[in-house]
Amino acid sequence: MDNLKNKKNIILIAVVLLVVLAIAGWQYYAKFAKQKLTGTGGKPSETTAEKVSPTREEVPTDIKIPEVGEQVSDKSIAVPKVVTEAAPGVSAKLRIFDIKAENNKFEPSTIIAKIGDTVHVNFTAVDKTYDITFPDYGMKQTANKGETKILEFQAVSEGKFTYYCESCGGLNSNVKGYIIVAK
């Protein structure tokens, strides 16, 4: 009888110990996951990707965000064909741009938006097959000659981000452009 009682006590202690270890492990994992997502210490900050990305630079000073129909002196800057509220009651906008790839370059090559905006890009390959790769947003689309593809993302981080045609030589090719996200 004592032997059975001892076995029950050992089993009960083992179950309690496993539950305690499971809870401690979950708390450790949750803390680690939070640090991984937000930077160090679980505090909101720049993510590690923003700090070390080879395709991200600081926003140029005195950047102006173009509006529909605006005339820009720099023809490399894309003027949105549509700017509208992203949702009722928010300051963020939906900005729609047309970007074409032709003669081994993107035209226009620079998209400028405000942080929080939704950026919609109609990407057209004019004279051959091109791809457009946004490495900092984890996006890529390939369009055959004459085809238009759509890319859409929310501009969540401030910076000047390089995009490029991977099949044309990637980051080292001339087929590249910039997404500037300003405050």
Image: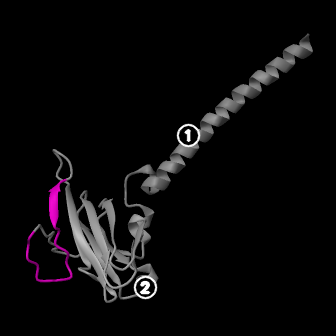
Give x and y (percent) for residue 67.
Answer: 12, 67
Residue for point 57% across, 45% down: 29
The tag earlier along the polypeptide, 2 or 1, is 1
Viewer-closest of 90 and 69: 69
Which tag is nearer the camera, tag 2 or tag 1? 2
Label 1 environment density (alpha carbons within 10 Å; few <14, some 14–19, many ≥20): few
Which amino acid, mark 1?
Answer: Gln
Tell whether 162 sits left or right of 107. right
Q: Which residue is mark 1?
A: 27
- In this orientation, does residue 183 appear? no
Q: Main secondary structure of the magenta part?
A: loop
Residue beneath disc 2: 168
Inspect the magenta stretch and tell me whether residue 150 lies in it. Answer: no
- Residue flagged by tag 2: what amino acid is it? Cys
Decide which of 126, 133 is in the foreground and name it.
Answer: 126
Q: Residue furthest front?
A: 146
Report the side of 67 relative to 39 (left or right).
left
